[in-house]
Image (cartoon, rainbow, N blue to C red):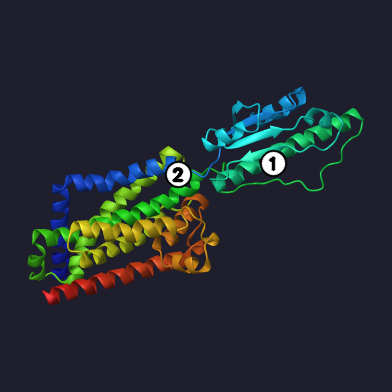
Amino acid sequence: MSVATLQRVYGVMRKEFRQMRRDKRSMGLLLFVPALMLVIFGYAITFDVKHVKVIVLDRDKSATSREFADGLFHSEYFDLAGTIERESEADWWLDAGRARAVLIIPPDFGRSIQDRRSVAVQVLVDGSNSNAANVTIGYLNAKVREYNLAQAQLTATAQGIRLPPLPIAVEPRIWYNPELRSSQFLVPGLIGYMLMLVGTVATALSVVREKERGTMEQIIVSPVRSGEFIIGKTLPYLILCLLTSTLIIVSAMLLFDLPLRGSVVWLFVTTVIFLLGSLALGLWVSTVADTQQVALIIAMLITMLPAIIFSGMIFPIASMPKVLQWITYIVPPRHDIVIMRSIILKGTGPEAWTPELLYLVAFALVMLVIASVRMRKKRSAA
């Protein structure tokens, strides 16, 4: 790269930094809005199902039935929302959303337990939220198993019998996220999603702003080449987005106790590569749109929807139809999220995510070439 080329690139960068310094509002939005979005999304989006409100219909009203019902609410998973006297009242509680489940204890519950007979307990579960319903049923089954084991132990003790150990005992050891907090799973995905959005929107609006102000014609007739113009436009926003990513990651570590078990160097390198692809995508958008409003709409459409739906940030890719699973491979946030989770949560090196890294490199190079070619055609047409 010659000295003249470096001087022209530096000139474009200096002009862009000057413009960013003048437009303090936009720079503030690019720096702090992603951190604000992280806080909102990180606390608002959760897969944890706790404090499920349960209504109890105790038709037995014995000490045994009360003991069984009270045992459900000695944890953070179930809250007693109230009691009812008739099953017809359950419809109102479920319809109004005042409860997610109704526990119905039959009249002969206490006697059946004392006589060591099997008894069926009915549970009505609100299935409008299928995920919450499945988790609620799982919690209830676990509580019932605990109660059954306790009753079996009492019976054996009363009869002077020592129960043999269970044939199989599960001793789970959860790696990477021992507390199974959904924020640990979601936040690395949110980081990639927001960087994709911010990088694409920033460069798209930057170039389109030149068109609206009439300064693009001056750039076209200047000695600055298309590649030099793209580099000069990209580097300032790359630096700004790196500051944004640092702010986001630090905020996530402070607010959500997000660990950083991997290499900071690899996190920086992969973030730079991902941002280069996002910024180049924004440059391509700027060659298609002629106004900032159109550029903003296009940038949000090609970043927000794919990043949310096809990246695996929220919806499991393995559960999608095969056709949609193939589509996810062309979505950059899918690969960045794999890398983010691997570095931040697992502490792995590039040997664990080499294919994802190669895709991000290829995407960044292809988008930079496409943006440069489109810019060159625009200059030729002018």
Circle 1: element type? helix
Q: Give the numbered dot on residue 45.
A: 2
Residue 261 shows in the view: no
Q: Residues within 10 Å of mark 2 (few under 14, many from 20)?
A: few
Residue at mark 1: 141
Above-or-below relation of 370 to 174: below
Q: At which x and y percent is residue 50?
A: 56, 37
Q: Do the residues labelled 1 and 2 touch (CB within 8 Å)?
A: no
Q: Report whether 111 appears left or right of 338.
A: right
**What amino acid type should be assigned to the residue bearing mark 2?**
Ile
Q: Which of marks 1 and 2 is in front?
A: 1
Q: Report whether 262 appears left or right of 19.
A: right
- Please identify the quadrant where the N terminus is shown: bottom left
Q: Give the numbered dot on residue 25.
A: none
Q: At which x and y percent is residue 41?
A: 40, 44
Circle 2: element type? loop
Q: Which residue is at a point 78% across and 33% down the rendered structure image?
A: 150
Q: At which x and y percent is residue 240?
A: 26, 52
Q: At which x and y percent is residue 239?
A: 26, 54
Q: Which residue is at a point 77% across and 26% down the rendered structure image?
A: 64
Q: Which residue is at a point 41% across and 38% down the rendered structure image?
A: 254
Above-or-below relation of 79 to 29: above
Taking depth in this image into account, of 118 and 1 the one nearest to the observer is 118
